[in-house]
């Protein structure tokens, strides 16, 4: 039985089937998942008993084949994130930008929120594009090398950032920023509800935004709550902070990527 004093994040980690329930009720489980379930329900005017019942039913009826990502290797987990969630971001944001342009041209004069949503979406695209590059070029390869070194007993990889906790802290902060932008879009769009008489493109745009938010929450959850904590635990001994990690990185990583990490 789920305890309503548990945080939403804890429940999502312990019961993967809970994620669909949280999505159904609009309960944030990634960046907004640090609240106890009871508090999150109260904030959204939800009956906690109804949510608990839905969680229990989901757990009983599930025949899900969802991977237990807390058990697989970090190499497999990071590969899954890149192939699934990073690939989705890279393909979906350009499509949503085209839809945004169409609905703004057609309805922007009468629906004042649409140009604002378009601006927020463009900002999200810019920030996530840089974010994914930093993870794929620097953080994830280092984590994989660290995991392999510990498994084989070989020399630890050279970290140009002192400790893996440093880039992880930056990635987590960027997740918070991305989550804030999609939350703004959620509110501006009236929870992705189109106005009466909206055209099919309008519906497609809002449906796409809703799906993007759901994927982003799953994406952030896998990184913030599973990949990052496990990566930090791989490191042994005290952190080795350095003020010169940017210079050290310059010899092995493209300068444009290093600059974006600073």
Image: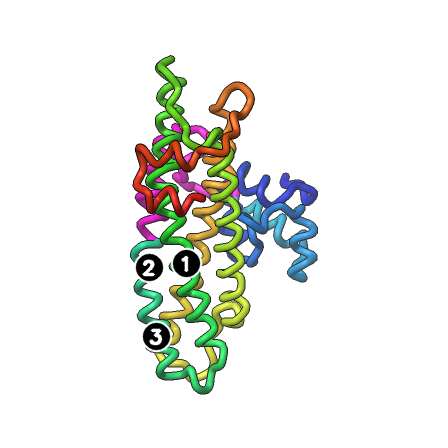
Q: Disc 3 on helix, strand or loop?
A: helix
User: Residue at image x 40%, y 47%?
Assistant: 260
Q: Are marks 3 and 2 in contact (CB under 8 Å)?
A: no
Tell me: residue 151, above or below residue 200: above
Q: Nearer the viewer, residue 166 or 217?
A: 166
Residue 2 lies left or right of residue 245; in this view the side is: right
Q: Depth-wise, is mark 3 or mark 1 nearer the camera?
A: 3
User: Residue at image x 46%, y 41%?
Assistant: 222
Q: Which residue is mark 2?
A: 92
Q: Earlier in the sequence, mark 2 or mark 1?
A: 2
Q: Gap between marks 3 and 1, in whole Å?
A: 17 Å
Q: Earlier in the sequence, mark 3 or mark 1?
A: 3
Magenta segment, which residues? 59-88
Give the farthest residue toward the bottom: 110
Q: Gap between marks 2 and 1, in whole Å?
A: 8 Å
Q: Which residue is mark 1?
A: 212
Residue 62 is one of the magenta-drawn residues? yes
Task: Indicate the quadrant containing the N terminus: top left, top right, bottom left or bottom right.
Answer: top right
Q: Quadrant location of residue 251? A: top left
Residue 251 lies left or right of residue 215; in this view the side is: left
Q: Are marks 2 and 1 in contact (CB under 8 Å)?
A: yes
Tally of marks: 3
Q: Depth-wise, is mark 3 or mark 2 nearer the camera?
A: 3
* Res. 101 mark: 3
Tell me: residue 70, above or below residue 237: below
Task: Indicate the quadrant containing the C terminus: top left, top right, bottom left or bottom right.
Answer: top left
* Res. 160 mark: none
Q: Nearer the viewer, residue 208 or 115?
A: 115
Q: x%, y% of residue 201?
A: 34, 75
Q: Earlier in the sequence, mark 3 or mark 2?
A: 2
Q: Nearer the viewer, residue 126 or 242?
A: 242
């Amino acid at each position: 039985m789920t305890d309503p004093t548990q945080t939403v994040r804890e429940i999502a980690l312990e019961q993967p089937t809970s994620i669909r329930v949280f999505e159904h009720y609009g309960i944030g489980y990634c960046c907004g998942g640090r609240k106890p379930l009871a508090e999150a329900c109260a904030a959204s005017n939800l009956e906690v008993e109804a949510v608990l019942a839905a969680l229990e039913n989901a757990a009983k009826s599930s025949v899900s084949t969802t991977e237990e990502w807390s058990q697989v290797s970090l190499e497999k987990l990071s590969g899954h994130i890149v192939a699934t969630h990073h690939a989705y971001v890279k393909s979906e944001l350009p499509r949503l930008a085209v839809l945004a342009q169409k609905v703004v041209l057609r309805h922007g004069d009468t629906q004042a929120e649409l140009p604002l949503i378009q601006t927020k979406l463009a900002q999200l695209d810019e920030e996530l594009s840089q974010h994914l590059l930093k993870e794929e070029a620097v953080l994830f390869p280092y984590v994989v090398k660290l995991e392999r070194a510990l498994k084989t007993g070989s020399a630890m990889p050279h970290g140009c950032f002192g400790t893996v906790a440093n880039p992880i802290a930056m990635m987590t902060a960027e997740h918070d920023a991305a989550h804030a932008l999609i939350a703004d879009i959620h509110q501006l769009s009236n929870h992705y509800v189109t106005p009466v008489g909206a055209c099919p493109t309008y519906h497609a745009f809002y449906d796409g935004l809703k799906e993007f938010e759901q994927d982003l929450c799953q994406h952030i959850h896998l990184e913030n709550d599973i990949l990052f904590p496990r990566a930090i635990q791989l490191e042994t001994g005290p952190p080795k902070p350095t003020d010169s990690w940017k210079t050290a990185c310059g010899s092995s990583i493209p300068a444009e990527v290093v600059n974006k990490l600073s």
